[in-house]
Amino acid sequence: MKKLLLSASIILLATGAFAQNNMTGSDARFGIKAGVNLARFHASGTDGSTSFNDNAKDNVGFNVTAFADFGVGNNFFIQPGVSLQNKGSKFEETTTVGGITNTTTNKVNLMAIEVPVNAVFRIPTGDAGAVQISAGPYVGFNISGKNKFETVTNGGAATGTMSDENDLKFGSTTDKNYSSTEFGANFGLAYRTNSGFLVGANYGLGLSNLVPKDSRSGDGKLTNRVLGFSVGYSF
């Protein structure tokens, strides 16, 4: 899957590189977009990875991005940006023992500042606007977050709810929860009208390990997976 996505990025970049360079200064645009993220962690390289991924659910968050389009070829743009991304994951497990049912939920809410640089190829659709296909790398900086735990018990005198939360810590040492930096690749599809309004979807594929460096063992790896939807305007 990764090889297929990376190959698509290379093809997109090659298409733009060989396009005729006939853009004018008016093709430089600036814009902002915002929307909803469906994010989850993905584990690999350990015996428990399959079980981990099966229990992982989407953490619903948000995204806000300021970006610029710079024309470098016929219908080909480079789009750098700065983005606030709400990521994380959610886990839920239910167990029943002796007639007592416990439902435990762990929600990881992670905030990151990302700097993406995407290659954008546009396919005009007449006077209405253009379809935009994009791909490119990003580097992210984890800045804040929380772990929220909740256990709901049903049955007997133990019926009730217990909850707790703590702040996430970022760095490379064993006392940290996650790495402070991350890099990955973005893949997007959008439609922009000629009046400047746009709507689109983006998939963020994390490539670097979120496990702090000093806590890593073997081939175990934890990465981000984020599906985002957004609306915006560029001028």
Image: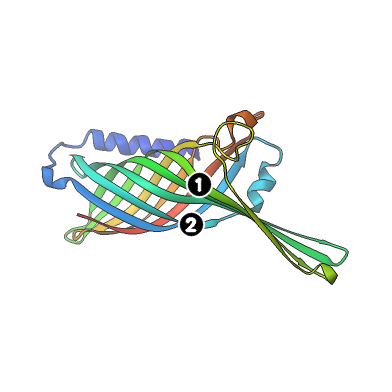
Q: Secondary structure at mark 2?
A: strand
Determine the CA span between mark 1 and mark 2: 14 Å
**In the depicted structure, whether residue 123 falls above or below residue 36:** above
Q: Which amino acid does the dot numbered 2 rest on?
A: Gly
**In the depicted structure, whether residue 176 falls above or below residue 144:** above
Q: Is residue 16 left or right of residue 217?
A: left
Q: Is residue 55 left or right of residue 8?
A: right
User: Is residue 5 visible from the viewing direction of this image?
Assistant: no
**In the depicted structure, whether residue 59 falls above or below residue 177:** below
Estimate how packed mark 1 is, as few (under 14), some (14 to 19) or many (20 or more) residues with alpha carbons within 10 Å. some
- The residue that appears at 12% across and 39% down in the rendered structure is 22
- The residue that appears at 62% across and 38% down in the rendered structure is 44
Q: Which residue is mark 2?
A: 61
Estimate how packed mark 2 is, as few (under 14), some (14 to 19) or many (20 or more) residues with alpha carbons within 10 Å. many
Please state the horizontal and vertical placement of residue 45, each as a whole percent of the image. Answer: 64, 35
- The residue that appears at 43% across and 54% down in the rendered structure is 228
Please state the horizontal and vertical placement of residue 41, each as a whole percent of the image. Answer: 57, 46
Quadrant where the C terminus sits is: bottom left
- The residue that appears at 31% across and 44% down in the rendered structure is 81
Q: Quadrant of residue 77?
A: top left
Q: Which amino acid does the dot numbered 1 rest on?
A: Ser
Task: Give the colouring mode of the picture.
Answer: rainbow
Q: Which residue is mark 1?
A: 144
